[in-house]
Amino acid sequence: MDVIMLTALSRWMENTDLEEITWRSGKNKISLKTNNEPVESIIPSSPLQPVLAPAIGIFRSSQPGQTNALTEGMKLSQGSELGWIETGKTREALKAPCKGNLKIIAIKDGQPAEYGQPLFFIEPE
């Protein structure tokens, strides 16, 4: 069983009332169990503030015909424009949630972004 099938199966299970499923093929066997209890965060604590993708789409660093010269280490004010997530004809702006220094740019123009994916990390002042 490959990762794609496991992903599809686990997503399917989330939308049903099944709590456990077992799959066998020859000597291979896999059991999946769902647990609807909240999961503790496994993200380590950090002084950096992440800027997360608000939707699934393509990251654009600027509006068409404009430039956005973001560089790591630059100072940002709260609400500074960091780019856009383009989903079809819709664009959602990415703005700095706080004043600080842009420490990490984790995405490039034209790359796909998943919902909740960290795109930037800011060190708050």
Image (cartoon, rainbow, N blue to C red):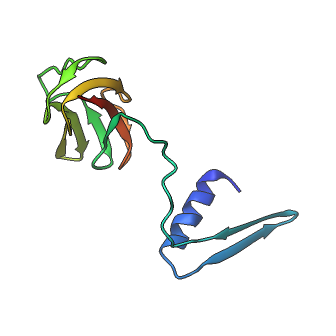
Q: Residue 13's x, y, as percent?
A: 55, 72
Left or right: residue 93 versus residue 45 is left
Q: Please name the residue shown 34% across and 26% down the image.
A: 105
> Looking at the picture, does residue 87 appear above or below residue 76?
below
Nearest the eye: 41 or 22: 41
Q: Please name the residue shown 13% across and 36% down the image.
A: 79
The quarter in which the N terminus is drawn is bottom right
Q: Residue 81's x, y, as percent?
A: 15, 32
> Looking at the picture, does residue 79 appear above or below residue 65?
below
Q: Residue 106's x, y, as percent?
A: 38, 29
Q: Please name the residue shown 20% across and 39% down the image.
A: 97
Left or right: residue 43 versus residue 113 is right
> Looking at the picture, does residue 33 appear above or below residue 45?
below
| Res. 96 image quadrant | top left
> Looking at the picture, does residue 110 appear above or below residue 93?
above
The quarter in which the C terminus is drawn is top left
Q: Residue furthest bottom?
A: 17
Q: Residue 33's x, y, as percent?
A: 64, 71
Q: Residue furthest right?
A: 27
